[in-house]
Image: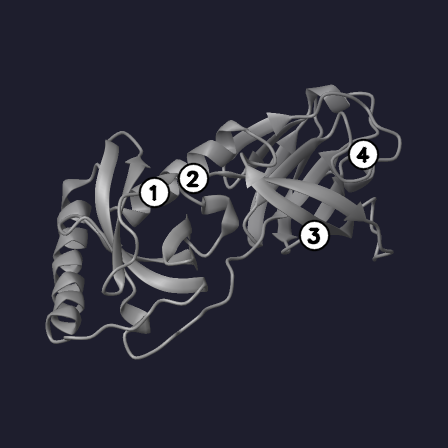
């Protein structure tokens, strides 16, 4: 299930440089849909699922991945075939293996409540929470789901609680997202386009005198915590390049004007 992050924002003083600063974001609830629906975010989820399920167009790459899947499946099946009793899967977050028994056998996180899987997240990131239907409750430390795969329709997969076979093995919840708001106080602000890791993600819509995170007229985006490269350019000769760090539960504001052009 894709999530939306409704936010209550608490502002804390931080180091300022050309209008750049972090503010703390208190995530008060996680509901359906993303914080912001944008092509970059949707493509990011689709690419994550392609990677997870080894659905590569490159046949050589796909063949190598399926070969690794067979090895993983053999290990998992051996652990299950040799057992006659299985532990109860307790409520909370668990590391699991998800497989269609041919193309992929990959690690994910699953949230369990009352013997059923309520949520599945790949890449240890809430932004990559996937849409699925539970076909069976958890029995003998495994369950069956049906989920939607990019360009492949629905797929039936088994979820193995292989890391819990020797007893309850709860794990940390997935990483929460961080945010960035690009903004500008320049008269050409609405011409500024932004690229992240060489992918165009959007454009500012107006000049802002003093912006906070999620300000109207800026470009606000949601990312998994990490370091990203960006490029931005306005009509004329102004452009900006550099990196920014996304931190969990925080929002970073980035001012673009003549004082910090390249």
Callout 4 crowding tier (Cα within 10 Å): few <14, some 14–19, many ≥20: few
Q: What residue would you read off at disc 1? A: 49
Taking the spot 45% from the left edge, 45% from the top edge, the residue there is 129
Callout 2 crowding tier (Cα within 10 Å): few <14, some 14–19, many ≥20: some
Measure how far apart labels 2 and 3 are at the Cα level.
21 Å
- Mark on residue 45? 2
* Residue with the most extreme front position: 114
Q: What residue would you read off at disc 4? A: 258
Question: How is the rendered protein coloured?
Answer: one colour
Compare marks 2 and 3 and give the one earlier in the sequence: 2
Looking at the image, do the residues carrying marks 1 and 4 touch, with CB atoms under 8 Å apart?
no
Compared to residue 165, the image places residue 114 above or below, namely above
Callout 1 crowding tier (Cα within 10 Å): few <14, some 14–19, many ≥20: some
Q: Relative to the observer, which residue lies in front, 4 or 193?
A: 4
Give the quarter of the figure containing the N terminus. Answer: top left
Compare marks 4 and 2 and give the one earlier in the sequence: 2
Q: Relative to the observer, which residue lies in front, 240 or 195?
A: 195
Looking at the image, do the residues carrying marks 2 and 1 touch, with CB atoms under 8 Å apart?
yes
């Amino acid at each position: 299930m894709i999530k939306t992050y409704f936010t209550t924002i608490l502002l804390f003083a931080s180091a300022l440089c050309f209008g750049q600063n972090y503010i703390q974001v208190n995530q008060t609830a996680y509901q359906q849909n993303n914080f912001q629906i944008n092509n970059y975010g949707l493509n990011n989820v689709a690419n994550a699922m392609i990677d997870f399920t080894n659905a590569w167009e490159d046949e050589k790459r796909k063949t190598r991945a399926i070969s690794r899947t067979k090895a993983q499946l053999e290990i998992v099946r051996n652990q299950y075939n040799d057992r006659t009793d299985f532990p109860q899967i307790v409520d909370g977050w668990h590391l699991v293996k998800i497989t269609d028994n041919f193309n992929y056998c990959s690690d994910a996180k699953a949230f369990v409540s009352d013997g059923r899987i309520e949520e599945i997240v790949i890449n240890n990131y809430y932004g990559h929470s996937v849409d699925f239907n539970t076909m069976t409750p958890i029995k003998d430390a495994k369950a069956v789901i049906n989920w939607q795969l990019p360009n492949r329709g629905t797929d039936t997969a088994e979820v193995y609680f292989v890391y819990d076979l020797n007893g309850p093995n709860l794990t940390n919840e997935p990483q929460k997202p961080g945010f960035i708001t690009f903004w500008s106080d320049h008269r050409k602000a609405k011409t500024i386009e932004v690229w992240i890791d060489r992918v165009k993600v959007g454009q500012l819509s107006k000049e802002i005198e003093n912006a906070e995170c999620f300000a109207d007229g800026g470009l606000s985006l949601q990312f998994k915590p990490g370091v990203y490269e960006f490029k931005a350019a306005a009509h004329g000769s102004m452009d900006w390049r550099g990196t920014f760090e996304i931190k969990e539960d925080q929002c970073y504001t980035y001012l673009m004007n003549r004082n910090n052009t390249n």
